[in-house]
Image: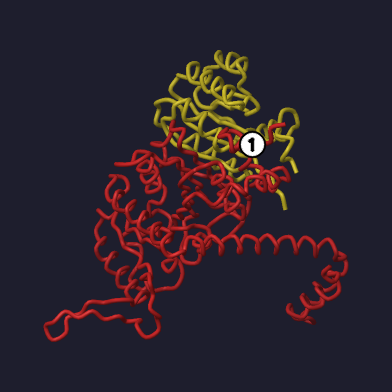
Chain colours: A red, B yellow
Amino acid sequence: METLADRVLAGQRYALARTLTLIENDAPEGLATLASLFPHTGRAHLIGVTGAPGTGKSSLVNRLAHYYRHPPEGQPRRVAIVAVDPSSPFTGGAILGDRIRMRDLSGDPGVFIRSMASRGALGGLARTTANVVQALDAAGFDIIFIETVGAGQAEVDIARLAHTTLVVEAPGLGDDVQAIKAGILEIADILVVNKADRPGADATVRALTEMLKMAHPTQETIMHHGRRMVINAGQKTQKKEEHPSWVPPVLKTVAVDNRGIHELAQAIARHRAYLEETGEWHVRDRVRLQSELENMLGEALMQHWRAHTAAEHYQSVLEEVFSRRLAPTEAVDRLLAQSLPPAA
Amino acid sequence: MAERRIRVLIAKPGLDGHDRGAKVVARALRDAGMEVIYTGLRQTPEMIAEAALQEDVDVVGLSILSGAHMALVPRVLELLRANGQEHVKVFVGGIIPDEDAPALLEMGVHAVYGPGTLTDDIVADIRRAVLGGENGNPTDQS
């Protein structure tokens, strides 16, 4: 009999949509389908798009997807978009509104858009986003955009999932100290200043460029006594590197007017070429699969532990913590010692 | 661990530009714990059916104030069926003359809501329609 996985591989769109739902819901059939699809993954270019709410992530993804569907040269690429919006922490409900900005893509069978609610996860993605992306990868999409929840500073899970991470900024969102804080800017492979027709765009570009110079002190051209000199800042520590490290470019776009999109697509292509030439593509793939595996292992261990722990025992230890007689670290030791059978 | 969330597409087919009602309903469904995909104004039936398919929704809510419901609704229903989504429950809200409601229900619309409908009633209807048993998605009711 034809399985759900067969139908996904055959390009049946409703089978794909059903599979994504089953994966999101942790349904056994979804996980089984995912396992059958797994050998067919690893081909798509995963492009993460993150940034603060209102910077224009959805509009930018819309334009980029349109560009890949109608490239100035070469074959159109098949594009999938996974757009994550936050779930309410109180009701679990969500309004998923990213499609509003993606109406230009409607009616194109080479595009598949899926909205996801974060369902309580805090890293900017949903817990099952990586699995959903895998299913889309197996379904044969060449490029998969993953648009995160409108993110501030700490939502950096996307960098582990994507090959290329775009961090989208807009003018006037913060002073230059924001640009030197740790976190989201550090994960950027490409920095995009969207809404660049607004006042302050050049100042934003300057602040980001300065920040990058400090983060990537590879080579700098300076004027010294009237002569141009090239200084390799990291020369002593870097052993004859064959490939220069990637310095994230800062690009200006106006997504609503379709400005800067061609240049952005070129930067994405350069980053992909860089990943392939340096072997970084392979490395990122391995890091990602390992971290996904470890996440799953963590969840499975937790379930295993719960199944092997008497609820009353857990409750009694919890009570000791509540009454400040037992520190949480000691509680962990005790709970693990008494419940987990030795690894077989 | 496994959770099943009701997914609803709220769409405005046709040309009227008033989406206050649609947004109020979207918000109420969100507050009832549902995942609501909101697609914005001026959607064609084709766009709505495509979104319903890609998002694998349980429910499609159509908000129509333009008077074009007798043309738009059958087309949406037809496309959903053509895509194999005949189990999707379709609700229609907006300005629907009383005499048109029976015809809409006859063609397969699950319920018609006029002005003054309580959002609590819509929430209850959707819960009953989706989780109530018949024609649901038996595979992911875990």
Quarter location, residue A249? bottom left
Residue pointed to by mark 1: A6
A145 and B24: which is toward the camera = A145
Which residue corresponds to the image point at 65% horizontal and 27% vertical from the top-left? Answer: B87
Quarter-of-image position of residue A315: bottom right
Q: Nearer the viewer, residue A67 or A2?
A: A2
Indicate whether A166 appears above or below A116.
Answer: below
Residue A70, x across and y down, in percent? 34, 38
Q: Nearer the viewer, residue A253 or A265?
A: A265
User: Which of these two is toward me, A322 or A334?
Assistant: A334
Image mark 1: chain:
A
Identify the residue at horizontal 49%, vertical 34% (top origin): B21
Q: Amino acid at mark 1?
A: Asp
Q: Is residue A221 left or right of residue B34?
A: left
Look at the picture and state if B139 lies above or below A185. above
Horizontal arrangement in the rendering, residue B69 relative to residue A199 (left or right): right
Q: SS at mark 1?
A: helix
Question: Residue B32 at what x, y percent from top left?
Answer: 63, 43
Give the answer, above or below, for where A215 lies relative to B133: below
Residue at point 59%, 27% (across, down): B91
